[in-house]
Structures are given as C-alpha cells and as structure tokens.
Image: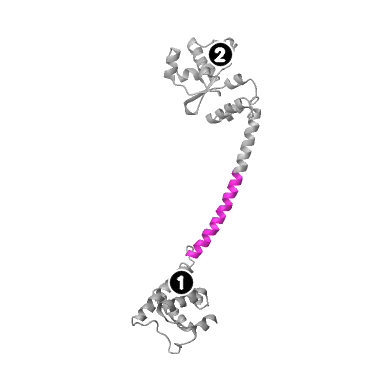
C-alpha cells in the first residue's frame, strides 16, 4: 500500500473551496488512486459507485479551469501538481524512488511536458535526458555509418556477383572460352585425362583444340553468345565432348578434323610443353 503526503492547506485553497462535496471527494479519490507520477486511467462507472454519486471525465478536467488535471493519451488523466507536491524537491535519476517516477513519465509520454511545466524540479532530469539524447544520437550516427559502410560493401559484392553471373549484361563469350581452351590449364589437362580414362583415347593438343572448336561452332550455330560465367562454359563443354566421344565409340564421328592433324603423337610431352 502506497503512502501519500496530504496537503493540510488544501481546504483553504480558493479553487478547492469552490468545489461541490462530490468534486472534492473526486479529487481526493484521484490522488489516492493514481500512480506515483500522478496518472490514472479511470473507470468512471467504478468511481461513481465508490464515491456514491455519478461523476465523469468532464467533471474532473474542468476543475479550476483545467489547471489541475489534464487528459493525456490512452484515456488517462494526469494531475499536474502531484509530483511537485509529493516529492518536495528536484527529481534525480540517481535516486531509486525518483527513477521509478521518471520511468512512469516516460511510459505515459509526458516527460517533456513535465520538464517544461516544472523546470525548477526537473533541472537534473533535463540534463540526464540531454545526455541520453546525445548518446542516442551518437549511437544512431555510429549505427547509421556502419550500415552505410556495410551497404557499400554489399553493393560492391552484388556488382561483382552480377558481373560474373551476367546480371549487368556481362557474359563469358564464345571467343573468351576459345582463348581459354587453348591455354595449358589444369582444367584442360584434367579433361584430357578424363577422356583417356573413359574412352582409352589419347588426344593430342591439336585434336583437343579441334574438338573444342567444333563444340564452339555448334554453340555459335545455335545463336548462343556465351555463358553466364566460366564455370557454366566448362560444364557445357565437358558434357558436349563426353557425348561426342560416346557417339564415336558407337560408330559416329567425333569431329571433322583436317587430314593434316597427326593421329599418333606423344600427348604426355605435349601436355607438359
């Protein structure tokens, strides 16, 4: 049960003396039932039953020309002078009882209004709020800077990724693959070894180049400008060559090669060259 100070001079105040007994009881009821920030969400039906007379929101807000009570968000009503009277001094965020009141003011969304109405008792509170706001602004700025930096890195990665995958119109063209296939790369060596393993056929460099050129010719004939990336080109070429060699084992022709291409050469020396 909360303990509250009672204003012994209340009954001598002009605004209170002008009230009817019903409204005097309503004021006392409100101050007994509100939270430590002076805020109450009233149930008028219940209050009317407990007081013994019907009362309304308008009855309370109109007291003293609206100088004592104010309606705030959420159907709640705030007693403006409640904290000033109950605390008898400045609010300090370092004091535990005051911290609870400050939290209530923030929860009800009236802390800025309170600081404007009572600057003398909220001076330290304003300083604390300023520090909090400064920290929030500083924190927001750091977060925003970090997000901007991350965003720039992501954009760069996306651009690189799009370039590789053809997202920006960049492709691995037939001509690029043709030049690539003529270089003595690990991929080319592995492919020749795979052909040897599968089909027991030792391809010379010239035979290999001729087969790749024939493959690229079929690609051009199909009006295909290239592939999204190098990996797709290698995969397509591998599957095509394996299929052609498989057909040749069944009596088909692997590739129309020039008669000048030697059929028996030391392919291992050629690969190492």
Please name the residue that numbered disc 2 is placed on: 15
Magenta: main secondary structure: helix
Q: Position of residue 180 (x, y in %)?
A: 51, 75
Does 211 lie within the magenta span? no
Q: Quadrant of residue 233?
A: bottom left
Please name the residue that numbered disc 1 is placed on: 234
Q: Residue at x 46, y 74 (%)?
A: 174
Label 1 sits on a secondary structure element that is: helix
Label 2 sits on a secondary structure element that is: helix
> Of 271 and 15, which appears nearest the observer?
271
120 relative to 252, above or below: above
Q: Position of residue 72 (x, y in %)?
A: 51, 27
> Of 135 and 116, which appears nearest the observer?
135
N-terminal-most mark, 2 or 1: 2
Question: Start and end of the magenta stretch?
Answer: 140-165
Q: Classify 10 Å Cα crowding around label 1: few (below 14), some (14-19), many (20 and above).
A: some
């Amino acid at each position: 049960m909360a303990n509250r100070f009672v204003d012994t001079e209340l009954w001598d105040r002009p605004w209170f003396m002008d009230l009817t007994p019903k409204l005097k009881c309503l004021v006392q009821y409100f101050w007994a039932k509100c939270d430590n920030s002076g805020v109450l969400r009233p149930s008028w039906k219940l209050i009317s039953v407990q007081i013994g007379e019907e009362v309304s929101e308008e009855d309370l807000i109109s007291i003293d020309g609206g100088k004592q009570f104010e309606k705030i968000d959420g159907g709640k009503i705030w007693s403006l002078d409640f904290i000033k009277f109950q605390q008898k001094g400045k609010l300090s965020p370092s004091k535990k009882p005051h911290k609870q009141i400050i939290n209530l003011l923030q929860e009800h969304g009236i802390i800025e209004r309170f600081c404007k109405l009572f600057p003398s008792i909220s001076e330290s509170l304003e300083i604390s709020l300023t520090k909090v706001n400064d920290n929030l602004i500083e924190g927001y700025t750091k977060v925003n800077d970090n997000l901007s930096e991350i965003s720039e890195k992501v954009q760069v990665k996306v651009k690189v990724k799009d370039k590789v995958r053809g997202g920006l119109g960049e492709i691995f063209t037939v001509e690029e693959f043709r030049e690539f296939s003529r270089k003595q790369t690990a991929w080319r060596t592995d492919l020749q070894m795979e052909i040897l393993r599968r089909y027991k056929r030792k391809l010379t460099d010239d035979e290999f180049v001729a087969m790749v050129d024939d493959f690229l010719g079929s690609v051009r004939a199909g009006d295909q400008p290239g592939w999204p990336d190098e990996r797709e080109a290698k995969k397509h070429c591998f599957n095509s060559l394996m299929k052609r060699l498989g057909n040749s084992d069944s009596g088909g022709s692997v590739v129309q090669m020039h008669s000048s291409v030697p059929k028996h050469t030391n392919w291992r020396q050629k690969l190492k060259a």
